Structures are given as structure tokens and as C-alpha cells.
Image (cartoon, rainbow, N blue to C red):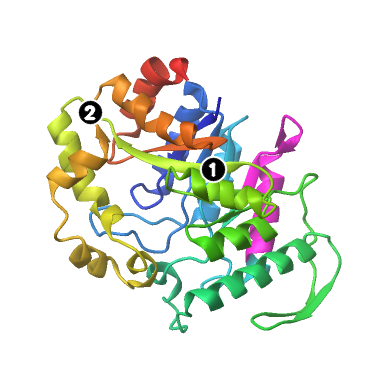
Amino acid sequence: MALIGYFLSSEEHPGSELVKGAVLAERAGFPAAWISDHFHPWLDEQGHSPFVWSVLGSIAASTERLRVTTAVTAPTVRIHPAVIAQAAATTAELFGQVGGRSRFDLGVGTGEALNEHILGDHWPIPEVRLSMLEEAVALIRELWKGATVDHDGEHYVVENTRIYTLPSTLPDILVSGFAPKSIALAAKIGDGFITTQPNADHIADYRRQGGRGPTQAAVKVCWHEDKQQAVKIAHKTWRNSFVPGQLSQDLPTPTHFDQASELVTEEMVAEKVTCGTDPEEHLAAVKEYVDAGFDEVYVAQMGPDQEGMIRFYEREVLPRL
């Protein structure tokens, strides 16, 4: 059976609430969590976007067993890969180990213009972003060896650079992918694979090209005692999930995502998103990912009530998984 984890949404909660959610998730029996890394939320209605590395330090100090993976960080434009290498090494040292492995893993991807364009940098085409990610991951791994590194690459330069504080066990690097080229890169450079769709073909592509380690995905739900209210919350906070194709990578502001999702109706959300309190519906939503073959499935609560959703899963869903 797949591991069932909890998704900490940095777009919807301040850092203090994310830490509280991590603690509640651990107590409820979730063994692992994802946490998103954004400079902006997708929509203004989501309302938050704390600095993930500060939040991770507090989660490390507030939990004992919970494994946490960034889902995902982009070590490409907004933050230089050498800085991500240091941040991830420090975070892994703070988290320590559980069961002989690091309690923190680094999930990476090519990012979105929404977060990465903020310093005025050019937003590259997808092929260039993939090339940047490949070089960034190689540089991070080299820096994690603890020696002084000089690197003059196609995209990045470091001089006389050494990371002194390293964890006893290095994090795994998991790579996100949604299309053939990104899945191929994940198989080439990753210790695991991250995606968001219950697509068995993506897992097969990843494995066929030599991809190792766990395959992970997330499913969004909206728990609320009133099902219709749950639909309204899901529509208000995550209608951007219905923005198709390349738009999600290229739109630069929450306002653009609001405009792009104007045609998304509550009925469309109700058809696609599990809302309400029926355990069978929540089980079916998770099972779709399990049946696709994912090793780990992370459940994201849409809306503010993390505590209610976690209690519900503790009572009604996790025992049956």
C-alpha cells in the first residue's frame, strides 16, 4: 500500500499555521508531508506565501518523526542553486533522521514565472529551464560533497564555494515532471519522481528510462461539514488548478491566474474535486493515485480548516488505508 502523506500549502497559510498543520498531521498518523515553495500565491484569495526555509526550520523543531519534502523548489532563477544547496543541507541537519534516512528531502522543478520572474530576470523557454535544472542539481550534489567547488557552467558560476554544515545523511533529490522531456530529466538526475496527475503512463515512462526511488503525487480535496460550502471554498481558493497547459508556467501574477480562471464554475469544481465529508469519496480520490502506481500520495486540504480535515482523515480515512 502507498504511503499517505499531508500537503502543507504555503499559498494558503502563514508560517505559524503550516507548523501547526505539520504537528497535527504527525499526531494524526501522517508519516510524511509535502510543503510548497512560492513567492506569490496562485490567487489573491489564497492569501499567503511565507518563506519556506524559515517554516521548515520551525517544523523541524516542532516534530519528531514527520518526513518533509519541498514540492517543489526551483533552484534556477529566483534563488541560485548554491544557496539552495546550503539551505537544504542546513534544513536536513535540523530535521535529522528517521528510520535511517533523512527526515527532509529536496523536491525540485523548473518553477513558474509567477515566482521566478520577480527580480526582473528573463523567463526562459521550457527547454532552457530544463537545462538550467539539470546543471543546478549537478551543482547542488557537488557542493554536498563538502569540498571547495569552482564551477563555470552554461547557466551558473560559483567560485571558492564550500558548504561547511552538512547533515549526517544527505537528502534525496526528487524531480518533478509533467511532460515527456521533464519526465526523462527526472529519470536521469532524480532520486525520485514528483507529479500531480494520477497518470500511470508517467510512472511507466519514468521507470522505463531508469528512474529510481519513490514516485510521489498530490491530490486536492476540500473537507467541510457542508458539501456545497466545500465546493464554494474549493472554487474560491483553487480554481487556478483548472488553468490548462503551459499557462500555469508562464502567467506572471495572481491577477493573471484570476483572469485565466474566470470561466471555471463551481459546477466544474464539484465535478472534479472531492468535497464534503463522505469517507468513501475521499478514499476513492486517494485510491485513484494508488491504483495508478504511486508509492506516496499527499492529500491537500483546500481552504483554511486544516485541523478539521486532519481529524476527519485520522478517524475516517487513514485507518482504512
Between marks 2 and 1 in the image, the one whose residue lies nearer the viewer = 1
Q: Secondary structure at mark 1?
A: strand
Asked whether residue 303 is drawn in magenta, I would say no
Tell whether 278 sits left or right of 141.
left
Q: Where residue 9 sits in the image (x, y, percent)?
A: 40, 46
Asked whether residue 100 is drawn in magenta, I would say yes
**Residue visible at 41% across and 76% down in the picture:** 118
Q: Is residue 109 visible?
A: no
**Residue visible at 28% across and 65% down in the picture:** 254
In this rendering, is residue 214 above or below 161? above
Residues shaded magenta: 84-105
Q: Where residue 289 sits in the image (x, y, percent)?
A: 45, 36
Q: Which image quarter: residue 221?
A: top left
Tell me the crowding category of disc 1: few under 14, some 14 to 19, or many 20 or more residues within 10 angstroms, Cα based: many
- Read off the residue under disc 2: 276
Q: Where residue 251 sits in the image (x, y, percent)?
A: 32, 71
**Residue visible at 49% across and 43% down in the picture:** 200
In the rendered structure, which disc, 2 or 1, sits on the residue that comes first in sequence?
A: 1
Tell whether 89 sits left or right of 228.
right
Label 2, label 1: how far apart the Cα atoms are: 25 Å
- Read off the residue under disc 1: 216
In this rendering, is residue 307 above or below 43? above
Q: Label 2 sits on what residue type? A: Gly
Q: Secondary structure at mark 2?
A: loop
Q: Nearer the viewer, residue 12 or 129?
A: 129
